[in-house]
């Protein structure tokens, strides 16, 4: 069903030029409802279920570009020409994150031939594809007068649209704006705490760590259904706030790590501190993580509990070295599978496909005379053709063939083409991917263990959740930052309860990635 929805979207967007209700209105100028901070309720949508599936080869180009922007490389030493070229290659395959990153490169002046107008056009292209993050970006452009005339009212309208579509950054931003006790429009703060909590929980469930920091302030005091508070803290509310801050650290929230450094080490108010007791050793470890996130906000620490579990669990031994602490908390992956040569990898261009990839038909068909975007395309089934998939660039003319019509007569002319997505040629192996340096490679454990959500963890170690490759939520489940360090007998995380995702337990399988012991150093 998901692929069919994607196919319909692209057919409308690419083959019919994605006309708006008034085809003379550019996406940047579309009419949207005004921001309403006083909505009675909020329904959580998930961004990953609305974006086009990402082409595996495009993802590799995208990750290669991200490596070249590593924070450890001085800005003046970065090869921005190569970064832009790789990001552009990925964007041409409709890699939506690459499209938005390329727009940022244009705005930053990293490509002399492109500027703010081209950035706005790229974001508009992503909006036509229905990408929630593109609406969030357009809101930022209106707020900052980037390529458009500044208009904060329109900015909030775009941010509201992005949040309604499930974009976690917009959800976190607007959620924080609704946390005031009453309205302060001049300060862009409003009072709607019940909706603020729902928005920020929706963002956190999609892996957006910064929302944990704001949620901790809303969780720590008792609240009535309308969001009001008498300021009272209980053991239960403080525990909830502590848990969400710890989750924020796992998801890369520097402010969460810094707050826990203070809470465990030197709290401002001993009578109302969140933590059960002063613990300088825990404070030191959170401090190391906070400084690491300050330097590289792309870091995530999914296996934080391996080296820094919350009380009452004892702290595992640590040798005091920064690297060993970060290595223990970061995500892991097995050695990448070595692909075997495929028939396509033995062909010449444009039929050639690197052995790292295989092809999967998407169900998207085009009757246009030229390729609507860069991709591998093959004649659609049912036309009596055996032409293998080949790479077409955007605008490249599709070939004509001699085919039989419905009457059985031969004709020469255009045929219907079907897009093929490149996928990893690893036979469905559980291999989370990330920018180089954000994952630690470990040997694949033997035996290979897999468990259902409802089972108890059979052995202590790092576990990775996984769903089918074509699952609508695979983009936020099959990620290294979803990993968890679990001890034997512990329950596996449950998607609805622990991630706030509308995902049945039986669609998720947990796989053992690293069986190493928790002693560090």
Image (cartoon, grey):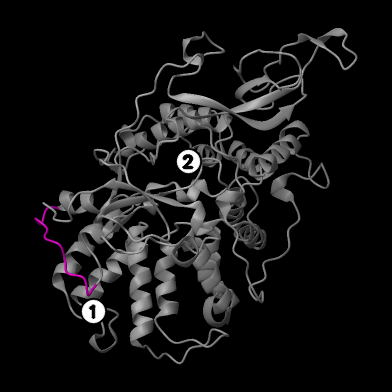
Is there any visible trace of residue 112 in the rendered image? Answer: no
Above or below: residue 277 compared with residue 415: below
Where residue 74 sits, quadrant-wise, is top left
Q: Residue 108's mark? A: 2
Task: Estimate the x, y position of residue 23 in percent, counting from the top left.
Answer: 82, 42
* Left or right of 151 in this view: 65: left
Q: Which mark is residue 312?
A: none
Q: Residue furthest left?
A: 319
In this picture, is 183 found above or below 363? below
**Left-right relation of 349 to 498:** right
Residue 184 position (above or below residue 303): below
Asked if residue 339 can be seen in this view, the reply is: yes
Q: Which residue is the extreme one toward the right?
A: 407
Along the viewing direction, whichever of 208 and 450 lies nearer the viewer: 450
**Front-most of 389 and 451?**
451
Residue on which the image places disc 1: 267
The image quarter containing residue 302 is: bottom left
Q: What are the residue bounds of the magenta stretch?
A: 311-321
Give the residue drawn at x 33%, y 74%.
242
């Amino acid at each position: 069903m998901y692929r069919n929805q994607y196919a319909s979207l692209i057919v409308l967007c690419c083959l019919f030029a994605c006309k708006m209700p008034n085809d003379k209105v550019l996406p940047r100028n579309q009419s949207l409802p005004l921001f309403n901070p006083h909505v009675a309720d909020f329904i959580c949508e998930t961004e990953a279920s609305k974006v086009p599936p990402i082409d595996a080869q495009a993802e590799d180009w995208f990750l290669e570009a991200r490596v070249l922007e590593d924070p450890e490389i001085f800005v003046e030493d970065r090869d921005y020409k190569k970064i832009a070229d790789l990001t552009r290659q990925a964007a041409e395959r409709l890699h939506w994150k690459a499209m938005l990153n390329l727009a940022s490169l244009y705005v930053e002046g990293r490509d002399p031939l492109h500027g703010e107008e081209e950035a706005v056009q790229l974001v508009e292209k992503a909006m036509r594809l229905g990408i929630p993050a593109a609406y969030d970006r357009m809101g930022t452009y209106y707020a900052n007068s980037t390529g458009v005339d500044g208009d904060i009212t329109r900015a909030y309208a775009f941010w509201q649209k992005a949040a309604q579509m499930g974009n976690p950054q917009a959800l976190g931003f607007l959620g924080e704006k609704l946390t005031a006790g009453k309205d302060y429009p001049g300060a862009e703060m409003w009072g709607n705490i019940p909706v603020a909590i729902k928005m920020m929980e929706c963002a956190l469930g999609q892996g957006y760590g910064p929302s944990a920091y704001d949620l901790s302030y809303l969780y720590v005091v008792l609240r009535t259904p309308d969001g009001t508070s008498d300021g009272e803290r209980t053991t239960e509310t403080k525990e909830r706030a502590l848990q969400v801050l710890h989750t924020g650290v796992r998801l890369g929230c520097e402010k969460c790590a810094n707050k826990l450094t203070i809470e465990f080490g030197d709290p401002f108010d001993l009578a109302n501190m969140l933590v059960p007791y002063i613990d300088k050793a825990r404070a030191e470890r959170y401090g190391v993580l906070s400084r690491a996130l300050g330097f590289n906000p792309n870091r995530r620490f999914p296996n934080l509990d391996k080296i820094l579990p919350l009380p009452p669990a004892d702290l595992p031994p640590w040798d005091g070295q920064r690297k060993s602490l970060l290595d223990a908390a970061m995500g892991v992956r097995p050695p990448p599978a070595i692909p075997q040569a495929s028939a396509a990898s033995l062909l010449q261009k444009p039929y050639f496909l690197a052995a790292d990839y295989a092809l999967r038909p998407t169900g998207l068909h085009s009757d246009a005379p030229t390729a609507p975007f860069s991709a591998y395309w093959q004649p659609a089934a049912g036309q009596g053709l055996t032409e293998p998939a080949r790479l077409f660039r955007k605008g490249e003319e599709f070939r004509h063939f001699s085919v039989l019509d419905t009457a059985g007569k031969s004709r020469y002319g255009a045929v219907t083409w079907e897009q093929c997505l490149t996928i990893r040629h690893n036979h469905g192996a559980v291999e989370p991917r990330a920018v180089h340096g954000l994952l630690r490679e470990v040997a694949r454990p033997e035996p290979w263990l897999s468990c259902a959500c409802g089972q108890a963890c059979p052995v202590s170690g790092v576990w990775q959740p996984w769903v089918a490759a074509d699952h609508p939520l695979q983009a936020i489940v099959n990620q290294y930052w979803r990993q968890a360090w679990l001890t034997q007998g512990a329950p596996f995380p449950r998607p609805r309860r622990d991630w706030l995702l509308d995902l049945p337990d039986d669609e998720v399988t947990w796989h053992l990635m690293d069986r190493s012991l928790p002693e560090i150093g």
